[in-house]
C-alpha cells in the first residue's frame, strides 16, 4: 500500500508519534511505508497468522530471511491452567525450565509456550485442536543456533523476580522500593558498556577506528535520540561500539500490541548514512506482524527492506534513527496490522476486511502475551529495571484487558484497563480467542505476582 508522507523535523515526528499512539489506526509517520514479504518465511508455521493463504504471490525480489532460528518443541503447557491450587507448582516448573539449566552465556533454553500446547488433562482437547491461533500447527524446532542474537540467561537468584527472596519483610520492601526507584528513574537514552549479547556484535567495526565523519554523524544521531525520544521508546548505545544500538519500544494503546515490550538491535553500517541502519527484531520465534518476521527481519521502506518512493525510503541527508524507531512504532505496531500485508486493503474492503482484521488482531494479542512472558523471564541486557518495573506497573492494565476480551470486547478497545467504547461490551470476539486468553490468564497472574505486581489474584477466573 502506498502512503504519502512529507518530510518533517524531529520535533514534528515526535508530535506525530504521540498522536499516532492514540488513534485507532496509524498509517503515516515521517517518511516511511510498511509492508511485508511473506515468501521468505515459510520455515515456521508460527509466522502464518489467519488468512495468509490469500497472500499475493508476487514480490519485488527483496532479500528473504536466511537466519531463521529453530526451537525445540516439548509437551509442557505451563502457561495454561485449570486448577488454581496448582498455580505455585506450575509456576515453579516454568521457572525451572529457564533457571535450572546449564547453558553458556547468550544461549537460551527452549520455551514450550512458543507453540500452542498439545491437548492435556488441563486443556480440553477440543479447544487445542480447533484453535485458529498461529501456533496451532507449529513445527518441531531445536535450540537457537546463533548465540549472538539471544539474551543471556537470567538466573534464579536474579532480582527480576524478587518476591519471596528476602529473609524479612523489611528487606523485601526495601528491595522492591529500590527496584521501583530504578524503574522510575530509568533513562530513555543512555550510554552503556557491555555489548556481548548484541545481535550484530560480530559485524561492523569490531575494534577498528571508525572514520571521523562517520563518528560525527552517529554522535548527531545520539543527540537527536537523547533530546527527542518519546516516552514509549528507550534506547541504549555502546561506548566501545558506536555502531551498535538497542531499543525497546512499548506497544501503543488501542492496538493489539498494547502494553507489550518489543526489542530491537541496530547496526550503523560502515557506509552509514549512505545506507540505512540494519535492524533486527527479537521475535522469540513468533510472527506477530506482517512486517516483523520470526527470523528477526524488519520490513520497512525506510530501511530499504520494502518498496517505497520519495521520502518513504532512506534519504542520506535527512533520514534519522529516531525516524526509524518512530516509524516502527506507528506504522508497524498499529491498530490494524492485517492491512500491512500488500494488497489486503484493496482485496478485502468493507465488512469482510474488518472481520479478517479482527481475527488477525486476536491472534496477534495472544502472541503478544507470549512475548510479554518471554521478555519478563529473560529481559534484554541493560533494560532489566525497565522490564521489571513496566510489568509491575502495567500488570493490572494487561489483566483488565484480558478480562474484557474474554467477556467479548474486541482487541484494542481497552486502554489502560478501561473499555473505551460502550458498544465494545457486546460479544464481538471469537469463542476460540476468549478460551485461549482465559487459559493464559492464570499463568500471567502467577508470573506478574512473582515479579512483584500487587492484587493480581482478583483476576483469577
Image (cartoon, rainbow, N blue to C red):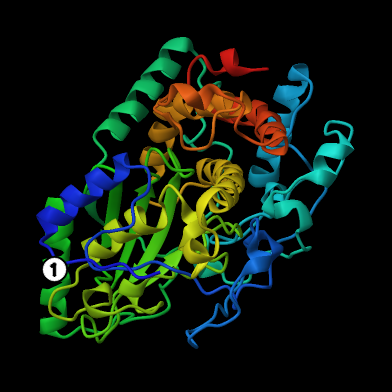
Considering every residue shown, the one lying at the far front of the view is 350
Q: Quadrant of the C terminus?
A: top right
The answer to which of 91 and 103 lies nearer the viewer is 91
Is residue 103 placed above or below 271 in the rendered structure? above
Residue at 55% from the left image edge and 29% from the top image edge:
409
Residue density around tag 1, few if under 14, some if 14–19, many if 20 or more, within 10 Å: few
The answer to which of 396 and 243 lies nearer the viewer is 396
The answer to which of 427 and 360 lies nearer the viewer is 427
Within the image, what quadrant is residue 172 found in? top left
Indicate the position of residue 269 as horizontal and vertical percent values: 30, 81
Q: Is residue 186 left or right of residue 138?
A: left
Indicate the position of residue 361 as horizontal and vertical percent values: 55, 46
Q: Is residue 395 left or right of residue 182?
A: right
Within the image, what quadrant is residue 171 found in? top left
Is residue 172 placed above or below 103 in the rendered structure? above
Within the image, what quadrant is residue 2 found in? bottom left
Q: Is residue 135 visible?
A: yes
Q: Is residue 144 visible?
A: no
Q: Quadrant of the N terminus?
A: bottom left
Residue at 45% from the left image edge and 42% from the top image edge:
260
Is residue 260 placed above or below 214 in the rendered structure? above
| Circle 1: element type | helix
Q: How many marks?
A: 1
Q: Which residue is mark 1?
A: 219
Indicate the position of residue 350 as horizontal and vertical percent values: 51, 52
Indicate the position of residue 190 as horizontal and vertical percent values: 22, 52
Amino acid at each position: 500500500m502506498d502512503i504519502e508522507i512529507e518530510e518533517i523535523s524531529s520535533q514534528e515526528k515526535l508530535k506525530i508519534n504521540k498522536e499516532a499512539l492514540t488513534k485507532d489506526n496509524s498509517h503515516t509517520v515521517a517518511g516511511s511505508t510498511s509492508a511485508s514479504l511473506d515468501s521468505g518465511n515459510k520455515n515456521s508455521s508460527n509466522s502464518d497468522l489467519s488468512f495468509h493463504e490469500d497472500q499475493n504471490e508476487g514480490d519485488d525480489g527483496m532479500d528473504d530471511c536466511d537466519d531463521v532460528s529453530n526451537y525445540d518443541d516439548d509437551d509442557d503447557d505451563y502457561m495454561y491452567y485449570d486448577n488454581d491450587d496448582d498455580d505455585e507448582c506450575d509456576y515453579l516448573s516454568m521457572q525451572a525450565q529457564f533457571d535450572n539449566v546449564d547453558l553458556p552465556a547468550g544461549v537460551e533454553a527452549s520455551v514450550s509456550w512458543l507453540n500452542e500446547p498439545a491437548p492435556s488433562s488441563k486443556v480440553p482437547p477440543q479447544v487445542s485442536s480447533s484453535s485458529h491461533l498461529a501456533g496451532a500447527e507449529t513445527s518441531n524446532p531445536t535450540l537457537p543456533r546463533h548465540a549472538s542474537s539471544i539474551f543471556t540467561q537470567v538466573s534464579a537468584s536474579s532480582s527480576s523476580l524478587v518476591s519471596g527472596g528476602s529473609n524479612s519483610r523489611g528487606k523485601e520492601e526495601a528491595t522492591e522500593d529500590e527496584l521501583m526507584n530504578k524503574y522510575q528513574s530509568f533513562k530513555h537514552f543512555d550510554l552503556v558498556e557491555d555489548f556481548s549479547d548484541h545481535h550484530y556484535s560480530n559485524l561492523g567495526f569490531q575494534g577498528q577506528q571508525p572514520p571521523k565523519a562517520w563518528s560525527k554523524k552517529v554522535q548527531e544521531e545520539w543527540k537527536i535520540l537523547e533530546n527527542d525520544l518519546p516516552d514509549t521508546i528507550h534506547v541504549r548505545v555502546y561506548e566501545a561500539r558506536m555502531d551498535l544500538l538497542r531499543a525497546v519500544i512499548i506497544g501503543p494503546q488501542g492496538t493489539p500490541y498494547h502494553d507489550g515490550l518489543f526489542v530491537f538491535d541496530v547496526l550503523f553500517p560502515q557506509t552509514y548514512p549512505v545506507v540505512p541502519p540494519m535492524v533486527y527484531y527479537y521475535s522469540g520465534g513468533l510472527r506477530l506482524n506482517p512486517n516483523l518476521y520470526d527470523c528477526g527481519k524488519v520490513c520497512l521502506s525506510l530501511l530499504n527492506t520494502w518498496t517505497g518512493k520519495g521520502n518513504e525510503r532512506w534519504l542520506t541527508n535527512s533520514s534519522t534513527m529516531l525516524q526509524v524507531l518512530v516509524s516502527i512504532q506507528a506504522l508497524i505496531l498499529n491498530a490494524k496490522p492485517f492491512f500491512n500485508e500488500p494488497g489486503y486493503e484493496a482485496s478485502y474492503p468493507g465488512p469482510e476486511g474488518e472481520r479478517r482484521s479482527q481475527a488477525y488482531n486476536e491472534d496477534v494479542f495472544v502472541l503478544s502475551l507470549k512475548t510479554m512472558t518471554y521478555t519478563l523471564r529473560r529481559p534484554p541486557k541493560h533494560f532489566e529495571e525497565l522490564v521489571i518495573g513496566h510489568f509491575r506497573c502495567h500488570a493490572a492494565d494487561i489483566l483488565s484487558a484480558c478480562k474484557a476480551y474474554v467477556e467479548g470486547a474486541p482487541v484494542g478497545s481497552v486502554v489502560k484497563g478501561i473499555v473505551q467504547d460502550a458498544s465494545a461490551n457486546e460479544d464481538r470476539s471469537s469463542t476460540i480467542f476468549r478460551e485461549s486468553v482465559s487459559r493464559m490468564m492464570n499463568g500471567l497472574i502467577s508470573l506478574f505476582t512473582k515479579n512483584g505486581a500487587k492484587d493480581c489474584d482478583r483476576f483469577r477466573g
